[in-house]
Image: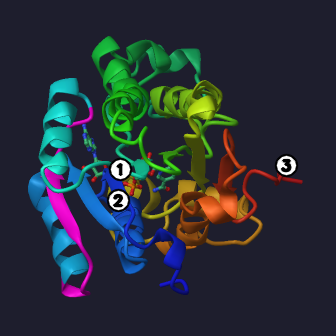
Amino acid sequence: MLSFNENLQGKVAVVTGGGGVLCGEMARELAQHGVKVAVLSRKQENAQGVVDEITAQGGKAIAVACDVLSKESIEEADRQIREHYDGYDILINGAGGNHPDAATSEEHFHSESLDNDGIKTFFDLTEEGLKHVFHLNYIGTVLSTQVFMKSMLHRESPVVINISSMSAPSPMTKVLSYSSAKAGIDNFTQWLAVHMAKENVRCNAIAPGFFLTSQNRNMLLDENGAYTDRSNKIIGQTPMERLGNAEDLLGTLVWLSDHKMSGFVTGVTVPVDGGFMAYSGV
Ligand code: NAD
């Protein structure tokens, strides 16, 4: 835990994808600073695990099921949270992830792979797969913001924190729809910051580099738990020569959440990436 930040005490945060690795860590960190946290996850039990850890440490949190692909589900989650809290100060849009149906199996296309059933090319990506990943990462963030922000407008210093990716400024190979959606997140972050500025709502994003979590475990580790070629390539392109740990995100999270520290910061995406974005590779 970072040193206690009394500015955050008593605030209320809603964290989508809060049952996951990165946003679960964010939820736990906010709770340590006295923030009351609504931990949202598609599956209630995943959120409940994080809530149990928070309450065991003396923090306050509730677990709510919420599928960000469904506006009805988000509205139902909002209704349930408002039975406990009368508004929100911090919204973290963390739900996201990848799916093989929206990714090619090879980094580069070669025409002979058109005759190879074992290779998924750009031409094989299905409309359903592309839409699913785009909706999860982009539309899910926009819909969640529409619903939850209404209960933030009356607060003194509301803040939205989106979760972007290194795939936004320059797309990662293979993961087409994810990259497009995360680029959309950076754009939405700027759009919303401008749109909401007169209401004093700040909107920023955190762009993690590469962190080992549930959604990318198969991409980063082989069946023996060793780094894949892709992981070694990532680490080779990361000047700090390692993957990130969830705790690496927490300082940026607290800084962006605290109006006294970042009250004039809005519309930015902060990379937390060990220098990946800055490195040209030579
Ligand atoms: P994770 O798989 O541990 O967490 C993702 C969470 O999103 C899970 O709890 C999952 O259940 C939830 N989710 C998936 N579909 C959902 C839906 N329809 N409705 C609600 N929740 C849903 O992975 P993570 O790496 O902790 O991901 C958190 C965020 O960080 C994601 O937005 C991800 O894209 C982003 N990110 C991760 C990395 C990384 O290296 N791990 C890098 C950059 C960005």
Q: Residue at x 60, y 56 (%)?
A: 209
Q: Residue at x 26, y 35 (%)?
A: 68
Image location (x, y in percent) of residue 15:
34, 53
Image location (x, y in percent) of residue 211:
50, 63
Q: Is residue 192 magenta?
A: no
Image location (x, y in percent) of residue 229:
55, 57
- Closest to the observer: 250 or 264? 264
Q: Is residue 187 left or right of residue 91?
A: right
Secondary element under disc 3, as helix, strand or loop, is loop
> Where the C terminus falls, by quadrant?
bottom right
Foreground tag (3 vs 2): 2
Three-letter amino acid code at the position of disc 3: Ser
Three-letter amino acid code at the position of disc 2: Val
Q: Residue at x 38, y 18 (%)?
A: 125
Disc 1 residue lies near ligand 1 with CB under 8 A: no
Picture quarter containing residue 95?
top left
Image location (x, y in percent) of residue 123:
45, 12
Q: Is residue 244 left or right of residue 130?
A: right
Q: Are marks 1 and 2 in contact (CB under 8 Å)?
A: yes
Numbered tag placed on residue 12 in the rendering:
2
- Closest to the observer: 30 or 9? 9
N-terminal of the two: label 3 or label 2?
2
Q: Is residue 270 visible?
A: yes
Numbered tag placed on residue 88 in the rendering:
1
Q: Residues within 10 Å of mark 1 (few under 14, many from 20)?
A: many
Q: Is residue 7 left or right of residue 141?
A: right
Chain part drawn in magenta: 56-68
Picture quarter containing residue 55?
bottom left
Residue annotated with mark 3: 280
